[in-house]
Image (spheres, rainbow, N blue to C red):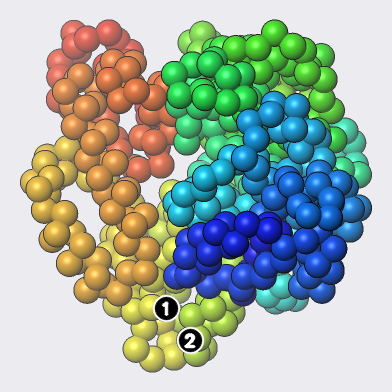
Amino acid sequence: MHKVLVIDDDRTVLRLVEKALADVDIELFSAETAEDGMALLKQEQPDALLLDIMLPDKTGLELAQEIRAFDAKLPVVFITVSDDSDVAIEAMKLGAYEYVLKPLGIEQIQDLVERGLETRRLMQAPVLLQENNDQSLDGEVLVGRSPQMLEVYKQIGRVAAQDVSVLIRGESGTGKELIARAIYQHSHRDDNCFLAVNCAALTDTLLESELFGHEKGAFTGADHRRIGRFEQCNDGTIFLDEVGDMSPLTQSKVLRLLQEQRFERVGGSDMIQVDVRIISATNCELERMIEDGEYRLDLFHRLNAFEIHLPPLRDRGNDIQLLIEHFLARFNQKLGKGITGISDEAMELLFGYSWPGNVRELQSVLRKAMLMATGPVLVPEFFPQELQSKKPAEPSAATADNKATDIAGFLDEREAAGSNDLHAESTEWMERYLLSRILQKHNGNQSKAAEELGITRGSLRHKIKTLGISINHVVKADADADESPDAVGEDCDC
């Protein structure tokens, strides 16, 4: 169970936090003074801390210095009634995860705690390199003893201690974040902050603000100064996932940071100096994006001081067997199951499938099969239908249209299948329909589709690949259709 500590002499804040976290599996502790709070922190060693700036016996900033000496990786969310920019900057210099103003909202608290706990997990949970038959369930394991994975382990060892940028390349679901964390944990920066930012999950404006921060009034809704992740992560490591989805403006600012280790906040003129190591990842073909004028060649070379390529699961041979054994042991523990094995017929299905979603897909498939299982052995009927055909389903726009108004039917089907991931599955179902519809509307023209969707073309390419959409299945047009080669039949792989 996660532990959260609140140090604040305002009882209304504690009651609000209690209400916000009432339905979450979290153990909550509270203190009203810095002295009591520090004693509780040392005793309980929480996973996240909500800390008031003004306390009866000393300031939160003073206490933060003691906390940082005791546990530099603890995500600290400062709470204050003051909109003093200097205080916010000082808090961030002391390693604050976030800085928020009173009054707080319930959803705001839930979001802050959830993100803080995830950041704690990224920094604390060890990433183990499995080079033997040890089936340890502590931390997270990079499973595999194939020649390809052994080479990846060697590369991590070569570059971890070197203070250079690393670009991790590989298909979606191959485990790029785990590699980034392994590099961080074996580096000399492992006592400092590690933050992960998904560049594909944010709009251009939000991503720029997330990375570099912004000044008050920089854009609509910027009602106070925000400290960005680069500034917050000074002396630490930042992981930029889906780095191929950055806009040209953000690319320019990241390039400058890599060249000079300094930047300006959005809407600001003050130059901010930082020392941050960047580890980035992508499943896009950046070389092709460079040729198309969508990605900066100079930024590519800066990010790619050292490259690690993660092989797809289908090229890893008997690693599939090791991964199956690992996930069975882990899910037996987490789900309270007693699965002892997999039938030969089911194993044949697993080895015959192409795994376009790689390790992430294998993990999801095994979890669902174990939830469906009625005995100690997994048999073919417990596995999804796409494995029976040995190829991933590629729903067409027509199929999506037929189900467009039948979300209830989809949910009924997934509930009957025993799904415990309805939110993610429903979101994927709706996103696949949306993208298919807009691509069909524009005869497969990705540039126009991305513009209407309000996302970058690189982000659209990533979603096309992740969702298994084939443009040839989405549109039908003759060779003269709209803007070749972006119209029909373009390879959707990024």
Task: Tell me, yes or no, if residue 454 can be seen here.
Answer: yes
284 with respect to 252 (left or right) = left
User: Is 94 located above or below residue 227 in the figure?
Assistant: below
Cβ atoms at labels 1 and 2 below 8 Å apart: yes
Could you tell me how far apart the alpha carbons at marks 1 and 2 are, in whole angstroms? 8 Å
Instruction: Work out whether residue 291 or residue 14 is closer to the camera in this orientation and state it.
Output: 14
Point out which mark residue 337 bears.
2
Residue 125 locus on image (x, y percent): 72, 61
Instruction: Work out whether residue 386 or residue 460 is closer to the camera in this orientation and state it.
Output: 460
Residue drawn at x 47%, y 49% as measured from the top left: 105
Residue drawn at x 68%, y 57% as measured from the top left: 8
Instruction: Check disc 1 and give the amino acid type.
Output: Met
Residue 461 falls in image quadrant: top left
Residue drawn at x 68%, y 46% as measured from the top left: 78
Lower position in the chain sequence, tag 1 or tag 2: 2
Instruction: Work out whether residue 470 or residue 367 is closer to the camera in this orientation and state it.
Output: 367
Q: Quadrant of the N terminus?
A: bottom right
Residue 238 locus on image (x, y percent): 71, 37
Residue 98 falls in image quadrant: top right
Element at label 2: loop
* Residue under pointer 1: 370
Residue 454 falls in image quadrant: top left
Instruction: Check disc 2 and give the amino acid type.
Output: Lys
Residue 58 locus on image (x, y percent): 84, 51
Residue 274 locus on image (x, y percent): 82, 25
The mark total stands at 2
